[in-house]
Every structure is written in structure tokens, then in C-alpha cells.
Amino acid sequence: MRIVTWMLREQERVTSDVGWGGMIGLGNASTNVNIGFSQRGNTTISGSANTGVSGIQGTFSTTTNGATSIGGNYNMGNGPRDGWNLGANYDINGGGMSGSVGYTDPITGLGLTSNINGNGLSTSVQVNGINMATNGPDGFNFDEMNWAEQNINLAQDRGNTLQENRQLKADGVANPESLSPAERNQRLADINRRNENAQLAADGTRSAEDIANMSPEAREAALNRINGNISINDIPGLILGGVGTVFGSALAFVGLGGSASGTTPTSNGRPIAQVLARKEDAVGGTKNDGESGTTDGKSNNGTDATNYPALPEKITVSSTEYSISDSQLRDVSKLKQTIENGSIKDPTNLKKLESLQNNVNDIQTRIDGNQNTIEGLISHATSMAEIFRTDGTSQKSMDAFYKENNNLIRKIAMENDQFYKDLTASKQTLAKETFLMKVQENSSLNTNFKVGDDMQRQAVYDLFNSSIQQRQIAAASYLYDNKVTFGRTEPLGTAQLVPREIHTNNDPNLLPGQGYTRIEKIGGYEVPMPGLPGVNPSSGFGNRIDPVTGKPNSGHGAIDIPTPEGTRIAIPYDGTVVKVTGEPENTLYQRSHGQAVTIQINGLDGTPSNYGYRIAHNSRIIVTEGAHVQAGQAVSLSGNSGRSTDPHTHVEIVKWNGKEWGSIVPSKQDLEEMKKLGIAK
């Protein structure tokens, strides 16, 4: 509050022709109205509202000096401060058109936006939607901090958070703020999916099995219809459909055989997969321009791309289901209380805890020191404002002083943001280690508990502390199987394989026997790979935070694509199945690919290459070792088997090293070699 007050004083003293000012806002990040005003300046009314078209908000702004603009934003529905955002505006009073593209990290609030208008191109860095620095036609400069607008943005975002908290509490989460970002997002996604399933079921046109087997596109289309929304993907089709209907009617009228009704294009007598209209193609031999790599019904290796091996109408898959009874929940709660009431006496453990506590204290000291520095800078600026008022300092000198002071405050505040994140992580580590040490030192509980085993440590902690019940049960089952029983004669949760049938040929985007592929950009090259197109990977090549243990800098030699269970996955080139491995169980705390298939791929000349793909965590492999497979042919059904937190497609690029097909992160040399083979560009 002191910072806001000081900024108002600064504005009044430095720019005497404006005076004090402020801003009032109402709404959330995507639908809102804001009023900005100043003592002797103009009043501005601005806002945005959802349009009913998925992801699009209309925007407006009008000022008492006559400036008025209208426009729109496109994002994924959470407003312009969450993920990618595209914007376009038109200044009614002669300013012309302007456009923008930007990305904001939803966790940190840091964003980068490029704008283009009649003055040229400029790029700005934002924090919580507020410009901090801009590089444009007039050069680089730090922007003045608009504290009022930032407070409104934070309040809008906090409103979204509180709404999410109400959803989480209604779903049984006692303290939503205690969830990690990954846990929170997963829990909210689960709630959203259940709500969507309820909507689809209430529509009365589908069975529960039909809903479970819907493709992502069919699901979105059905929900848009139920809710009266229009998909962004429908707009070009609606425009072209209207033009086509008028043109077809005109042709029919003049007797040229025109028709006012359309049909789906066909290839070899079969419908062409509608997914081919996407930017990322869904079959082998793809281009990144939304067209099939061939126009004659042939795959990139010359085989008949529409004559895929037939699949059974239904395929039985097994997936792990978790359950826990009320009595088991009570036992877990009692055991947790017993553990927390324990003590730590081992000197080595006590020394480690002291070190962890010191780390927490050091970070807190840095935060406090930075906060004191900020308060000192604010106090100094307030004192200087009084001096400037009477000593005749030039406006230019005052501007330079305030700019430097603001930059220092901004720099220290951003440093503190990182310290707060470090503090949260350090406190979590301290709490986790304290709990595990108490388990370790309680001889009546830690039977066969291997304190040096990272997976066992994580499973023990999750069993008693995770807010995600499925993870608790998975941990209980894993620990019991490893004879960490806590003195019990049966597990504290139950995991079992449950079979179910999947309809294999009900995806309207695919031909019978066909599966999905996508194009991935790797090191400046475009590499066709197995997987659902149009979905951002949840993990890529390189280091990441381990989704189970939470450890940073955990190596990951694959790309993970979130994929509904049972989705048909293909390879983009002809090849040969060299290995099929794994079991259908979900083994969250054991390193396992689950059901996986490794396929050697051919170059464009049909010759087997030294490269291939491994597709893991499937619910079913639908090809056999030694089989030849075609480009675009379904080889697996996606799933959640092995060490997997959610249904997804895990795709590795593999290379023959003379002994085995080893996973690689493709180097520049690999990508060049793949390009020569015609399997990258």
C-alpha cells in the first residue's frame, strides 16, 4: 500500500499538469471493465468480454479526449495473462490497425509481447500484464510502473484463483493453497473433465462408453454445441460454407451442375481424414502446411496409404483403477498422527535438519533485507520529492532520478519474487525430510523402508501427505508390494487391473486402421513423429522436474504428449516392429515404459535406416514383433501404463548402436543424417 501511495505522490509532484490519479476495475481476466482517471487529465473506460466463440474476447477502449478503439483477443479462454495471446485493434479516430502476439507464463506472470502498428514493431516485457521495458522504433527504455493497473490485474487473477479454490474445496481438498502447481492443475483438469462428462451424459445422446471413447475434436464440438459456443476452428468453415452454398446455388441455377449441399472429399472411395486440414498433419508423409504429403493415396514410401490393416471393431484394454475404503483412510490418518508425534534423535538427521532450517532462515533474511531496501528507496524518493518542490530542479533531472529509483525498486522486487519461490521450495523440503526422518526412526513403522531409495521415500511421503487420492493409493499399493507394510497385514489402498472395451474405428478424423502422427520442431528441423497433433507437449527433451519425485534437472529423453486413453497412434513412415515390451499396470513408483513398441523406420527410398521410434505408456500394442507397418498405420492405443502420472503418449527417437535400439536426443549430426534419409526437414 505504501508503494501505491508513493507512486501517486510522485505523479502529482513531477507532472503537475496531471495531478493524482487512479483506476477501478471489475471482473476477471477475460471479462472485465476498467475506469482510469486523473485529477486534471482524461478518463478512460476499457474492458473485454467473451464473445461466445471459444477463446475470443472482444475489447474496447474510449477516452474523454475522443480516442476510441475496438478489437479482439484470441487465447485459450483464461484471458490475455495466461499462455499465448493474439490481439488486433482498430483506432476509429485515424490511428489505423495494430496487432500483437505474446506469451505469459501462468506460474510466474512473466510475459513477452510484440506489437506492430503504423509506427513499426516493438517488443515489451511484462510482469502480471504490466509493461516493464520496451524495445521499439525509438530504442530501448524502461517503462513507468502502473501500480494501479497491476493491482487490478492481480485482483482479477486472484478472483480466478478463489473461484478455483471453491471448486477444489467442493471436490474434497481441504487446503487448495497447499497444492503444488502441477497437483492443482491436474486436480482442476479432473474436475473440469468430470463436469464435461456430466454435460455430455445429460445431453442424452451418448452412453458412458461412447463419452469415454470420444476423440478430442468430437468432444470439443459436442460441448460447444451443448453450451452454444462456436469453435475458433469452425469460423473458416462457416465462412467458406456460406460462400460455397451461395456459389453452388448459383451454379445450379444456371444449369452447370452446382449443388447447395456439400460432401466429404474421398480418396479411393473413403473419406479423407478431416485432421488433414490442420496445420500439423495427422498421417505419414506430412507437410506443415495442412496438406497430405501425397495426393494419389500413396504413403511417403509408396504404399497404399488408405489400405491400412483392419482392426477389430472392439479391443479390450486393461487399466489400473485405484480405490480406498473409509477404514483405510482412517488407518492412514492415524498412522500419520503417530508419525508426526514422533521425535528425531539421530545426530546425522539432526545435523541435516539444522542445515535445511538454516537455508530457510537465510532466504527469509534476504527477503527481509530486500524489503527494507525497497522501503528505504521509497522513503528517499518521498524526501527528494519535497526537495525538488522547492529547489528548482529541472524536470529532466527529476525524471532521471525517478526512473533510476523505479528501476532499482523493480529489480529488487523481481529478485524477491524468486526468493519467495525458493523459500516455498525450501520449506517443503524441510517438511518432507522431517516427516521421513520420523518414519525412519520409528522402529514399529519402518519395516523394510529403504531410506536411500528415492522412489520409496517419495511413496511414503505421498501416502500420508498427497492431496491427490489416486497418488496416495498408488503409493500404498507400491509400498505393500515392496513389503513396507507399516505393521499392517493388508495394503492401505487397492490397485487393480480392470478390463474395458475400446471401439477402435469411431474416430471421425481417421480412416479405419489409421492413427495419429504430428510434426515436432527439434533443433531447427521439422521431424514427423507419432502422436496426437495440435496438442502442446507436457515435457520435451532435456532436463525437467520429475513429475513423481519433484526433483529438478531430471533427464528426459523423449517428448510427452497428453492424449486421451485409447487414442490410435501411428508412425509417419513405413517401418518394421523390432520390439514389443511391457505390462498394462500403472507403476507410478517404478521406472517402467509400461506397454511399449519400438519401430525401425525406412528412408524415403524404402531402405531400413538406423533410426526409429519407441512409443511408451500405451494401453495396448496392436502390432507384433517382426511385422511391417505402413506410414499412418495405427500401431498402439495410448494409455497410462508404466511410470506415468496421466494418460499420454511418450515418444522417443531411437538409434541402432550396434547392440540395441538406444534412446537419443538427436544431435545436429543426427538431424542432418535424418534429413538426408528424408525423415526430417
Image (cartoon, helix red, strand yellow):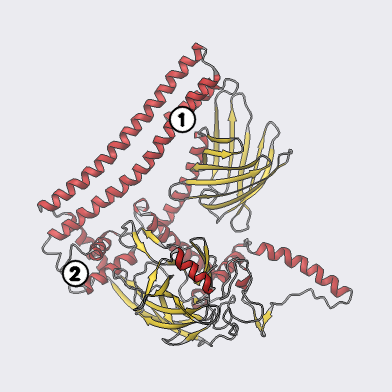
Residue type at the position of mark 1: Asn
Foreground residue among 281 and 336: 281
How far is mark 2 from mark 1, CA to CA? 56 Å
The residue at which mark 1 appears reads as 406
In-image side of 382 versus 513 (left or right):
left
Residue 648, position as x, y percentages in the image? 43, 69
Residue type at the position of mark 2: Val
Whether residue 618 can be seen here: yes
Residue 129, position as x, y percentages in the image? 52, 43
Residue 183, position as x, y percentages in the image? 37, 58
The residue at which mark 2 appears reads as 484
Query: Which residue: 53% across, 75% down?
Result: 572
Query: Which residue: 62% across, 40% down?
Result: 46
In-image side of 161 versus 465 (left or right):
right
- Report the disc number at residue 607: none
Residue 357, position as x, y percentages in the image? 21, 45
The image quarter containing residue 77 is bottom right
